[in-house]
Amino acid sequence: MSRLSILFAASEMAPWVKTGGLGDVAAALPAALAKAQQDIRVLLPCYPALRAAFPAAKEVALLPALAPLLPPARLLAADADGLPLLLVDCPQLYDRPGNPYVDTHGRDWTDNGLRFGLLSRVAALLGQSHSPLDWRPDVVHANDWQTALAPAFLHYEGGAASVLTVHNVSFPGCFDPHLLHGLGLPDRAWRFDGVEYHGNLCFLKAGLQLAPLISTVSPTYAREIQDKHFGYGLAPLLHYRADALRGILNGIDDAIWNPATDPALEAPYAANRLASKRQNKAALQAQLGLAVRDDVPLFGVISRLTHQKGVDLLHPLGKAITHLPAQLVVLGSGEKELEAGFRELAEPHPDAVSVTVGFNETLAHRIEAGADIFVMPSRFEPCGLNQMYSLAYGTPPVVRATGGLADTVVDVNEATLLDKTANGFVFHHPSSHDLWIAMERAARAWKDRRTWLRIQQNGMRNDFSWRHAAGEYLQLYRDAVAARG
Ligand code: ADP
């Protein structure tokens, strides 16, 4: 099949600028596509972290003011371990400390409409015949609201095919209507089936309306966001565009999340060498001051402590867990009340409950390896990574059936044990009661060592590689190019 040229436009990219899942995808997916011999470049704003990481970035174009409110900018080219980056250099908009979206008080930068309007504008320009570069993409891949105006510009002005991926539909990017002219959009774009949304210029809505094909990060989330409980105000539009909407599950980086090679672990292990997983449990218990014992299951949680993640459903179960008996280890940070609540949970039971408030990558790896059962009771979960890490680490997860959790975890029952798909424990209703029933089921199954081994091995043999996801994105790009004719 012919090689495609792809411009991947994003507002963050790990490890340099990352606030969430988009940052990971922007690093891993383009790398996987490059490995699959595709001609891909990643377009990003030149934040201070990127300027520092790529001091040798070369100017490849001068961009004049592209619209009445957009300042002139430069386009820089850099090389990230063989992956070409294009950086929009506009210090007036991007040379700011910290987070890409909010100031030090956590408030949105007031000129975010211009900052990401410029990024979207440049992404579209590079896909058009008057691009300042010789390199021309067949397809522009926009991601989340920050680049979602690119498909709108391409729709109204012509140019490359485009696709838009939504990583989290709860951030729409809505701005004052004067930006329509300010960003150079035509008057005719101001329609309910254009870029207008409740009297505002809405970036995400514009992209969802006008990109020829759209995707999100799991098949179940693709269905859920067509429902008003998940899709916020955009559910009717997403439902209307259902034929153009696909769900493509994110992958995990198996160079970093692999129990056979993970340097953070006490003892490496694999699906056919699971015995040494036990040493990781003992080491974790000792490290955290829990009783070192293998006759009770150890539940693990690594999570942002927020309502979305459903950890408030777990909190009331603390006592019941110790009575089961079982142990619980929690690593997370987020809402202050939840942080305090979990801390209090640990105090009376230091030998059975450990709570670490904070962000700790090494401990996260050690929990994935040392816990017996992972717990992820999310209310919604576009894709989710931790359940996939848990499956890869032989730590069967207890999850709520939502988004990517529903697409990756297969509930243990007679039929799924027989067909070798059983890899975890699924509950449906978001309540402590239903979570508890699933956790008890998991604890009982854990006691039956032969069945447990089968469940662990089923999960460890799942393929969540980016190679697989990259193939699906490539098909999406080909379909977008074909639809353009
Ligand atoms: P989300 O992106 O919604 O927070 P995911 O499960 O998709 O949830 O990804 C969370 C990522 O962040 C995982 O890599 C997880 O291990 C990591 N993580 C979350 N909280 C912590 C923490 N307190 N310490 C270390 N890693 C964490």
Image (spheres, rainbow, N blue to C red):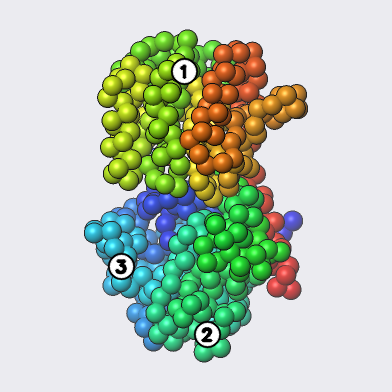
Which residue position holds label 1?
Answer: 324
Label 1 crowding class (10 Å Cα cut-off): few <14, some 14-19, many 20+? few
The x, y position of residue 379, in whole percent, is: 50, 46
Q: Quadrant of the N terminus?
A: bottom right
Mark pair 3, 1: CA separation: 49 Å
Residue type at mark 3?
A: Trp
Looking at the image, is mark 2 or mark 3 earlier in the sequence? 3
The x, y position of residue 102, in whole percent, is: 31, 61
Q: Quadrant of the C terminus?
A: bottom right
Looking at the image, is mark 3 or mark 1 earlier in the sequence? 3
Instruction: Residue at 70%, 73% (x, y): give it.
Output: 484
Check the image and report above or below for 172 versus 433. below
Residue 311 appears anywhere in the view: yes
Which residue position holds label 3?
Answer: 109
Dot 3: element = loop
The x, y position of residue 87, in whole percent, is: 41, 64
Label 2 crowding class (10 Å Cα cut-off): few <14, some 14-19, many 20+? some
Give yes or no for contact between labels 3 and 1 (Cβ–Cβ under 8 Å). no
Residue type at mark 1?
A: Leu
Instruction: Residue at 52%, 42% (x, y): give it.
Output: 430
* Left or right relative to 24: residue 358: left
Which residue position holds label 2?
Answer: 190
Q: Which label number is shown at residue 204? A: none
Give yes or no for contact between labels 2 and 3 (Cβ–Cβ under 8 Å). no
Circle count: 3
Dot 1: element = loop
The x, y position of residue 376, in whole percent, is: 49, 36
